[in-house]
Structures are given as structure tokens and as C-alpha cells.
Amino acid sequence: DEHQSIKKKSDIVLGVVIPTEDLASVIMLPHGKTIVETEQDALELTRAMYADAFRKGVPMFYRDKRVQSSHEFVRANPDGSDDLVSFDAATRSYTLIKNLALAGKGFWADVISA
């Protein structure tokens, strides 16, 4: 067996140590899919939402490691570019901080033609 067994002094196997990354592909969630399958479904749904928004000319906003404060977001633009923007809740407006990626080079650019 590839996993480490847990045994008593009498050599009775009490259990098996399974790395958590292995569990994601075998644990069935209540809706009948594994964690890996559920994550894949979520990714496909997210990609479809971004593609639909881009077709309509609507930018999408998200946060990643490039964001430095709670009022900053990455704006994924319909041309495939990314911008770092700041959101002002009082005026409900975004201000460009800097361009992060040119047209067709942003994180979500590959869904433009999807």
C-alpha cells in the first residue's frame, strides 16, 4: 500500500494515513461529486460567466495577490487586459491605479473567444 499504516504494538492496523491532497479526489460530497469534480465545475462556471460578461462588453472584478488593500480590485476588461483599480464606496466609482496586462494578455484573456 502507498499510504502509511497506523498500528498498535500488537501489529493490529488501526488506520491508514492518507495525505489530504489525495482525499480531494475520493471524498464524495452530498451532491454526489468529489471535491476535485466540484472545483472543476466551479471553474467552468466562472469561465463561462467571464466569457458572457466580456461578450456583452462588461468588465469583471476580482482580487488576487496583486491587490494590496481592501478597496482595490483587479478589473478584467473585455479586451483581455487587466487593470488595478480602487473602488470608492461613497461615489460607487472605480479609479485606475495602473495597467497590469495589455489587451489579450490578462489572466482571463483566454475566455474572450469562448
Image: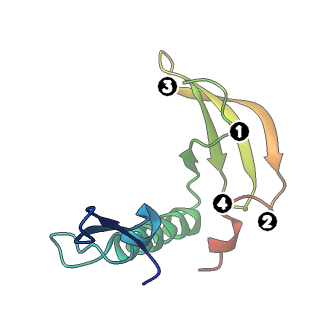
Residue at position x 72%, y 61% in the image: 80
Q: Which residue is mark 3?
A: 92
Q: Is residue 43 left or right of residue 107?
A: left
Q: Which residue is mark 2?
A: 104
Residue 44 location, x and y as percent? 46, 74
Q: Which mark is residue 66?
A: 1
What's the distance in space between the residues labelled 1 and 2, CA to CA? 18 Å
Q: Are marks 2 and 4 in contact (CB under 8 Å)?
A: no
Q: Is residue 113 above or below residue 101?
A: below
Mark 1 or mark 4, which is nearer the start of the sequence?
1
Q: Which mark is residue 78?
A: 4
Is residue 32 or residue 113 the one in the foreground?
A: 32
Residue type indicated by callout 4: Pro
Disc 2 packing (10 Å; few <14; some 14–19; many ≥20): some
Residue type indicated by callout 1: Arg
What's the distance in space between the residues labelled 3 and 1, CA to CA? 22 Å
Please name which of the two marks, 3 or 1, marks the residue nearer to the observer.
1
Residue 26 location, x and y as percent? 32, 77
